[in-house]
Amino acid sequence: MTTIGILGAGQAGTTLARVATAAGYDVVIANSRGPETLQRLVKDLGPRARAAYAAEAAAAADFAVTAFPYAPGDRLPVQELAGKVVIDNNNYMVWRDGNFPDVDAGLKTIHELRQEQLPASKVVKAFNHVQFHERFHLRVPSDALPAIIRLARPAGAPDRKALAVSSDYPEAVELVTRFYDDLGFDAVDNSPLSESWRSSPGTPMWRHHVDGQSREELIRNLQRAQRSVIAAAAQAKGPSPA
Ligand SMILES: NC(=O)c1ccc[n+]([C@@H]2O[C@H](COP(=O)([O-])OP(=O)(O)OC[C@H]3O[C@@H](n4cnc5c(N)ncnc54)[C@H](OP(=O)(O)O)[C@@H]3O)[C@@H](O)[C@H]2O)c1
């Protein structure tokens, strides 16, 4: 049985835990405080989930997820994550995170900065452009479901959607491709991490985080991305959906 260490128990971490346990994965979930604050959540998630401190979740993990924004001073279980694939689903947003000059100047991506924090891990950007939270503006009642649940389809379904994945490690891309498939999505490889700006807020592919896009549409949209546009989007003052 594969165990995922999910660091971050907000909207993204808890919804990812929900779909992963439903797909047969075991989950150890942590926040920045302690497992006693997550008892209600793990009760809801069922027997495949337990709560732990972040270092314990990282140690128990076959692979891990950092489901919280990047910050230079992040306290991370670097040793416990060494050698492991670490999925980073963060989106850089200045209104929330502050400015990172190297990212603003296009010299690095926010995920390369996460890789620098975890030098012995295999960081992979994934799950950043799919909605984990419920929607408030509904067209039909099923719109309320997070897109990661609402858009999931079996392999081969004609309306299956695709999600992007970027890493400097091919084995991390392979792992995420299988994980996406298990959760009901195709994958498009947008490696290496230095290219991951193409899936940032403000890009053509980003605009489909609610309704999703096919593999062909995602490939096309990644190619259409312009770096000058994402810099402006990151600086936007107000909250965006993810
Ligand atoms: N929400 C979405 O639909 C969505 C979609 C795509 C991508 N994302 C990305 O996913 C990330 C999380 O978003 P969110 O909406 O879930 O945020 P959130 O609701 O603010 O949750 C963040 C979680 O991370 C925990 N955390 C912070 N630092 C930690 C650390 N060092 N170790 C372990 N846990 C830590 C927090 O714990 P405490 O509560 O104890 O502080 C909290 O549980 C963001 O980077 C966002 O850009 C979100």
Image: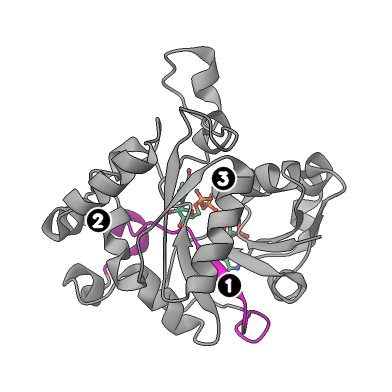
- Is ligand 1 within 8 Å of the beta carbon of the residue shown at mark 3? yes
Mark number for residue 11?
Answer: 3
Q: Position of residue 34 (x, y in %)?
A: 74, 64
Label 2 or label 1, whichever lies nearer to me, is: 1
SS of the residue at dot 1? strand
Q: Position of residue 197 (x, y in %)?
A: 28, 62
Which residue occupies the extreme top position in the image?
140
Residue on which disc 2 sits: 234
Q: For this view, does 134 lie left or right of residue 99?
A: right
SS of the residue at dot 3? helix
Q: Earlier in the sequence, mark 3 or mark 1?
A: 3
Quarter where residue 66 is shown: bottom right
Mark 2: which amino acid? Ala
Mark 3 and mark 1: span between their CA atoms?
A: 22 Å
Secondary structure mostly taken by the magenta-highlighted segment of the chain: loop
- Is ligand 1 within 8 Å of the beta carbon of the residue shown at mark 1? no
Quarter where residue 190 is shown: bottom left
Q: Is residue 55 at all visible to an observer of this figure?
A: yes
Colour approach in the figure = one colour
Q: Marks 1 and 3: in contact by CB < 8 Å?
A: no
Mark 2 and mark 3: span between their CA atoms?
A: 20 Å
Which residue occupies the extreme right position in the image?
47
What is the span of residues highlighted in magenta in the rendered image?
77-99
- Look at 53% across and 35% down and name the residue there: 156
Residue on which disc 1 sits: 85
Mark 3: which amino acid? Gln
Seen from the viewer's position, the closer of residues 165 and 206 is: 165
Seen from the viewer's position, the closer of residues 169 and 88 is: 169
